[in-house]
Amino acid sequence: MNFVTFQQPAAAIAEASDSPLALYVHWPFCVSKCPYCDFNSHVRDHVDQDIWCNALLADLAYEAALLPDHRLNSIFFGGGTPSLMDPATVEAVISAARNHWRAAEDVEITLEANPNSAEAARFADLASAGVNRISLGLQSFDDASLAFLGRAHSADEGLAALAAAQGAVDRVSFDLIYALPDDNEARWSANLDRALALGTEHLSLYQLTIEPGTRFATMVAKREFEPLGPDLSATLFELTQARTAAAGLPAYEISNHARAGAESRHNLAYWRYLDYAGVGPGAHGRHSGLRTVRHKKPENFLAGVSRNGHGIIEEEVLAHHEAAHEALVMGLRLAEGIDPAALAARLGVERLVDEAAVDRMAGHGLLARDGPILRTTPAGRLLLDSILVEIAT
């Protein structure tokens, strides 16, 4: 398959700047589809690595032409299952990104990985390709829970993969899913003990949510299982916040915990509402006042790149008020909070929040002010969606 060599984007090229940039690269393929997953992932019998490498490079070149002279702070390979990528493909994308932009000296290059033994065997090669941070989808330490979650690895494989990741790169994070239907305080507390003893400086701890369109949503509709109740889920969330903080890995975002300095720089770019480019099937980007979306289906993405030199299916100008609302939603997920006045000025709106509503929520102990900074309290993080409805302008 031949791809268009893109020279000049149809959209207006952004002015040259030294603005920080985060790059997201989506690899859409998985060995199997997990029943809780609503991400853009696809199971294919065969993936031609050469074709996909060339397509990603072409799509990347298009984005780079839109964003000259930015400083590349992070690259994140997400999926899908990026650990299924040939290390040579990963290396080619990293090299191209470094050629398109000036990379920060400490550029963070993360790759999401599954703990299957075949993929773990690639970690050293992925590190040689330029990956310096691995985000590992352990999800559970219990084989029965892994089976319920549809995972293709065992608990022992997960621990072996974690050891391999820690041997390959300096920065490792892993994910766990809790608030499963049969979870309780004692069981989750024991899992936290184990997680905190494994020596990583970053943990992503997610409550199981039943997303529309997933197999779990169908199972719940058929009453094949009952999700954990909201009261116990809230108790487990509060337990998680207290235990991780006591261990020196406090929540810097609602579901993400890290030692100081070990936070995911890439994800902080999203939550701080900075520019990011997205390439690959289904990838989203936000920069230069635009939101971009790529074709989700892999075959449609390849056809788009072959035809146009990029995989974009949707591009829209972000209205000021829409950007302001998104920045508020994202920023209040962070423990550091936001400066509403500074954000409003940056995004070209008169104000970001209803001050009377903020005062009311603060009176209820759900929000707190520290000079110009507004943040949620521990109690407020449990009710963030409701708070946003009240305070957004």
Image (tube, rainbow, N blue to C red):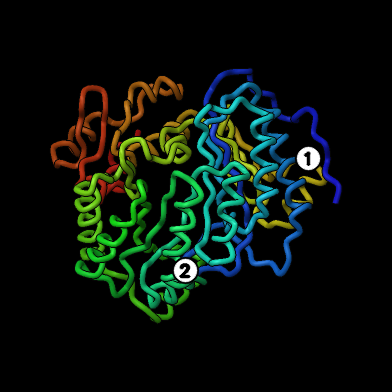
Residue 309's label in the rendered image is: 1
Residue 176 seen by the camera: yes
Image side of residue 392 versus residue 307, left or right: left
Q: Is the residue under label 1 in contact with that under label 2 (CB below 8 Å)?
A: no
365 up-or-down from 356: above or below? below
Amino acid type at circle 2 is: Glu
Amino acid type at circle 1 is: Gly
Q: Residues within 10 Å of mark 2 (few under 14, many from 20)?
A: some
- 382 or 354: nearer the eye? 382
Task: Give the Cα distance between marks 2 and 1.
Answer: 40 Å
Image side of residue 352 versus residue 365, left or right: right
In the figure, residue 149 lies in which quadrant? bottom left
Instruction: Looking at this view, name the residue that lies furthest to the front.
Output: 167
Q: Residues within 10 Å of mark 1 (few under 14, many from 20)?
A: many
Residue depicted at 33% across the width and 22% down the height: 341
Residue located beneath label 2 in the image: 157
On the image, the x and y values in percent for residue 156 come to 42, 70
Of the numbered discs 2 and 1, the one sitting upstream in the chain is 2
For the residues carrying marks 2 and 1, which lies nearer the camera in this image?
2
